[in-house]
Amino acid sequence: MLPDTIITSDTPSSSSQFNSSSRIICRVCQKQYSQYTCPRCNTRYCSLPCYKSHSLHCTESFMRENVEEELRQLQPDDESKQKMLHILKRFHSEEQEMDYMDEHGSDSDSESLFAEETVQKILSGSQVGLDDLSVEEQKHFLRAIASGELSKLLKPWEPWWLKRSANYTRLSQDGTQLVQPLDNTGKLASSHDNIENDQIYDIPPGPDAPLPSVRRLSATEPSPLLTVHLVDIIYSYCFTLRLYNGDWSSDSTGSVEVLLSISSVLGQGGQPETVLEALSYCSEQTCSPAYRHMGGSQFALNLMDDVTSVLYLGGAAIVCLLCDLQRLIQAAEKEFKSEKSGKSRGSKIKTKLKSAERKVYFIKCWANEQPNEAWSSLAAIVKAEKSSAMEYITRGRYSSKKEEGSKPKDKPMICEFQ
């Protein structure tokens, strides 16, 4: 049960329906008659300002208990757990098949990727496009991309949410940055300006302008499922940045398409009701053939760790993440407007991006108002779901090895010839 509803008013009580001799003076301002009583400490107060100032500990604990109660109601049921286990089992069997193919790879792996003539062009500094390659070279090149072989040539990227500096992320009460850079004219510089070339920020910059209250954005109370939707969004963001080695600005349209394909909330208008349901959908997309080269189920488990790390950083870091995500969507919108794509495809993706940007902005304003205790509780739920998934995968691998040991190793019944 949630605590009793608090009835407040912005103006002092002036009703004369009661006998003044039986009324009690406000315990806070000592000037007006009290009309309300705090459900936690029974302090009598007359208006909203007096309620907010009567006890900071009282109001914070009231918010914390509301959030914790909502999170307790989000525990997954047995049916959702079975669905998650079924997905992991299917991906584990697919990974075993991929491991076998890797162990029995074809002779083409030892062949050179490019011909000597093409290598000399590259070494001389000439630009070489895909059309300049022979059919066989194109085949090898695309195969190397799909297998993730070329990713070894890239400098490893350290996610900003794993850096020590991220633990000291702080924003003002209205969400704006406490320290903001100035441009050459002495004015506040926008975080949109040359952000991809700015090395000052260890983490994405926060909002440029104060964030409005959620009550100003919507007349209804925010859904308690926003915590679940946030897990989906953080997972999708971390996936996209890891796929693009932290540089989404190099291909904002490609990045946003990846984001929408992983996120049920932003890409499909999904409404997951539990953390398990949100993680199951994102994990299923992560282990799909399109992204299997990233690491399959192990990569999905690592992304759950990323989500946990972001949540433990607290509200300021979450707001900064959502700001970066909003900038990604806005950059993609600009590119889609400028490119000459088909009307049907263009209008469809623009509608999705506009809807996604509105959702991200609303959740950003909502997240800015939540107490930090809510994020640690949510992180604990994600961590527990990850542990359950990892335990199942470990148990599945142990049983499969046991079965392999009891049977003689035979050649596969079906082989793929090239």
Image (cartoon, grey):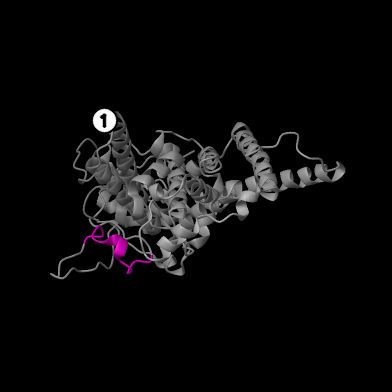
Res. 369 visible in picture: no
Badge count = 1
Q: Amino acid at mark 1?
A: Lys
Image coords of residue 404 (percent x, y): 81, 43
| Farthest-out residue, top | 344
Residue found at the very far front of the displayed protein: 117
Q: Nearer the viewer, residue 184 or 358?
A: 184
**Residue 151 sits inside the magenta stretch:** no
**Which quadrant, please, contains the C terminus?**
top right
Residue at the (38%, 63%) spot, across then down: 203
The kind of secondary structure element at disc 1 is: helix
* Residues in magenta, as a range: 190-202
Residue depicted at 68% across the width and 39% down the height? 93
Residue 22 image-quadrant placement: top left
* Residue 212 image position (x, y, % from top left): 25, 49
Residue at left offset 38%, top offset 55%: 128
Q: Measured along the vertical axis of the image, is residue 129 above or below residue 333?
A: below
Residue 266 position in % (x across, y down)? 39, 39
Can residue 395 be seen in this snapshot?
yes
Q: Is residue 18 above or below residue 242?
A: above
Q: Residue furthest left?
A: 185
Left/right of residue 116 with respect to residue 248 in the rendered view: right
Q: Is residue 33 above or below residue 271?
A: below
Predominant SS of the magenta segment? loop
As rendered, which of 108 and 194 lies closer to the eye? Answer: 108
Category of crowding for the residue at label 1, using alpha-carbon neighbours closer than 10 angstroms: few (below 14), some (14–19), many (at least 20) = few
Residue under label 1, please give it.
Answer: 343
Give yes or no for residue 192 being in the magenta stretch. yes
